């Protein structure tokens, strides 16, 4: 069965420090992978996506993610975290249902940023 | 350009009451989804509609019904609300399956 695992429920980093949020997926076919961010009281906003090609993808707000097929991972990184990055982050894999599809979400990682 | 609009933003129900959550999109997308979000559970799919006139169950459909009224609108109905349905509900749309979802801002529902 398809699934997405985000091993870290809550991470705290200092402002200016680097960040890596982990994501592992289970899906038999070529995955379509996404990272979304959710600020409190808001809907989800797409950070970046991977469909094919270059395994290092760039997103908005200075985020990037690297797809590693051998490790079934799609970790999110940022070299220097800003206080405004405090939010909850969700990894998702796109799965096909007939001619359409759906996203399977991980349970999320909450990021807190220390001044 | 409003994108995906959900109404209401907040709702409190008593156990056994019914209500309908509304979702409308102006993005001309084919597919629409209803998710619920609970702390520590991520987002779980309730129902989805691949196109106008079709609906399918997702991961957690029990206690809910949906209607895809037209291409723009996709409603979620709770016939007899239960405290376990206290959650934040998100509607989302997508043009095709490998495209990113576009989310509404959510409806926060409390059932007492």
Image (cartoon, coloured by chain):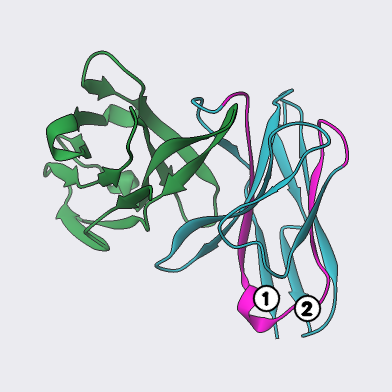
Chain colours: A green, B cyan
State if disc 1 and disc 2 touch (CB < 8 Å).
Answer: yes
Residue B100 among those drawn in magenta: no
Span highlighted in magenta in the image:
B69-96
Q: Is residue A74 left or right of residue B21?
A: left
Sequence-first disc among 2 and 1: 2
**Among all residues in the image, which is located at the extreme right?**
B69
Picture residue at 76% right of the left edge, 77% below the top: B81
The residue to which callout 2 is attached is: B13
Q: Which mark is residue A93?
A: none
Helix, strand or loop at disc 1? strand
Q: Pick the residue in front: B112 or B97.
A: B97
Cα distance in 3D space between marks 2 and 1? 6 Å
The residue to which callout 1 is attached is: B110
Q: Quadrant of the N terminus of chain B?
A: top right
Q: Pick the residue in front: B3 or A1.
A: A1
Category of crowding for the residue at label 2, using alpha-carbon neighbours closer than 10 angstroms: few (below 14), some (14–19), many (at least 20):
some
> Could you say where residue B63 lies in the image, as x and y percent from the top left?
72, 70
Q: Is residue B30 left or right of residue A50?
A: right
Query: Count of labels shown?
Result: 2
* Chain name for mark 1: B
């Amino acid at each position: 069965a398809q699934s997405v695992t985000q091993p870290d429920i809550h991470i705290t980093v200092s402002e200016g420090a680097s960040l890596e949020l982990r994501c592992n997926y289970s899906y038999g076919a070529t995955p379509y992978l996404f990272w979304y961010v959710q600020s409190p009281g808001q809907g989800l906003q797409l950070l970046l996506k991977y469909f094919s090609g270059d395994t290092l993808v760039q997103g908005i707000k200075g985020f990037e993610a690297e797809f590693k097929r051998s490790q079934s991972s799609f970790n999110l990184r940022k070299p220097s975290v800003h206080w405004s990055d405090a939010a909850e982050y969700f990894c998702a894999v796109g799965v096909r249902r007939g001619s359409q599809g759906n996203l399977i979400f991980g349970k999320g990682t909450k990021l807190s940023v220390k001044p | 350009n409003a994108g995906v609009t959900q109404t209401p933003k907040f709702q409190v129900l008593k156990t056994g009451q019914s209500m309908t959550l509304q979702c409308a999109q102006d993005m001309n997308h084919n597919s629409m989804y209803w998710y619920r979000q609970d702390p520590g559970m991520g987002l779980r799919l309730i129902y989805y509609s691949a196109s106008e006139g079709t609906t399918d169950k997702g991961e957690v459909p029990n206690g809910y019904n949906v209607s895809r009224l037209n291409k723009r609108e996709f409603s979620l109905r709770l016939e007899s609300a239960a405290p376990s349905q206290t959650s934040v509900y998100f509607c989302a749309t997508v043009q095709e399956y490998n495209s990113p979802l576009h989310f509404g801002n959510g409806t926060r529902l409390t059932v007492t």
